[in-house]
Amino acid sequence: MTTGYVYNEVFGWHDTGTNAGLFPADHRLGIQPFQHFENAETKRRLHELVVVSGLIDQLTPVRPRKATDEEILLVHTEEHLARIQAGSDHPKGGDSGDGLSPFGPGGIEIGRLAAGGVIALVEQVVDGAVDNGYALVRPPGHHAVPEHGMGFCMFANLAIAAKAVRHSRGVERIAIVDWDVHHGNGTQAAFYDDPDTLTISIHQDRVFPPDTGLVEERGTGAGEGYALNIPLPPGTGHGGYLAAMDRVIAPAIDRFQPDLVLVASGFDANAADPLARQGLTSSAYRTMTERLLEVAGQHAGGRLAMSHEGGYNPVYVPFCGLAVIEALAGVTEPLADPYEPIFGGMGQLELQPHQTALLDQVVPLLDAIGSGNRA
């Protein structure tokens, strides 16, 4: 099994400024300059762990390229692309659209490389050059809607890649699983009326964006039934996530029978993340990856590609990411996670009755998913 890997040091140069978490420094409000939540450390440290652990020697490097205007416009409006270009041309940079997603001068070039890196990986997977792969890119993408960026995202990296390979490679049916702790609203918006793309988002209920990701959001028109949302309660640990994988995500993919499986891989559901309140450890991410590899093998010839999204604890994200990439590469002797005994022993990580009740609401929605009349 060959696993492609996308990384470029310039992703660490995406400049989110001296924001204190979310907000610009402002002494009048008592906000000192610090770091934006979306900074380079989690991705840089994950990449360095991939290298130091020796895993890099088992991966196939995939060179990222810059997404073209034509590829970006498969998802985004011309107005959004022009906004990003104008901010990129400004001496102080700009914002992707919501006032909370800054980027520095020339930032559009890094944004193009992130989107293009995901396209390059997905093309390699579809072409059979690699069996699966991981794109460790920045800035992230799953919150960017057609009209603007948001939630630290500039361009909808994974949605652009999905539409690009459909256009260039004729891929028909694509399943997209988003396990970032925040709702994958941008990816959902890109395919909300499309019955040939199944979007599944498993996230913490109403954490961000606070008004999206509800069970009732199911698609529209011909796409009705092909958007699935699993808004898990705060405090859900590995028991709830793995139950969702077994009761909803894997069965949904089974019904849909895709040609390709894509994953928006955020690690902010980890037990130490500052922006959410879930309890996952690296072993949960490893198990979810193994389960998706299994269903991709059953329906998509094993074709599975992941694009990095959120995750804001620089100490623990690298171990979660390493577990996922090890699983993709079929590593049989993984590096031990030194934090697993601590985070895994905190209690309340097993499946709870109120989490089961939420899944009970979602399971009946699988009946609306068809396989495109495939034999």
Image (cartoon, helix red, strand yellow):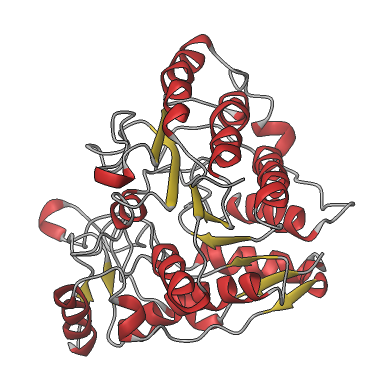
Horizontal side of residue 233 vs 101, given as left or right: right
Q: Residue 246: percent from the left, percent from the top?
A: 63, 29
**In which quadrant will I find the C terminus?**
top right
Quadrant of the rendered structure where residue 124 is? bottom right
Horizontal side of residue 226 vs 93, given as left or right: right
**Residue closest to the eye, 27 or 22:** 22
Q: Residue 362: percent from the left, percent from the top?
A: 43, 24
**Residue closest to the eye, 255 or 355:** 255
**In which quadrant will I find the N terminus?**
bottom right
Q: Residue 270: percent from the left, percent from the top?
A: 55, 41
Please, is residue 50 above or below residue 265 in the view?
below
Quadrant of the rendered structure where residue 282 is? top right
Residue 224 appears anywhere in the view: yes
Please, is residue 142 above or below residue 336 in the view?
below
Q: Residue drawn at (58%, 52%), measured in percent from left and top?
A: 317
**Residue closest to the eye, 368 or 281:** 368
How many numbered marks, from 0 up? 0
Q: Residue drawn at (66%, 49%), measured in percent from left and top?
A: 299
> Seen from this angle, which residue lies furthest left?
28
Quadrant of the rendered structure where residue 284 is? top right
> Seen from this angle, which residue lies furthest right?
333
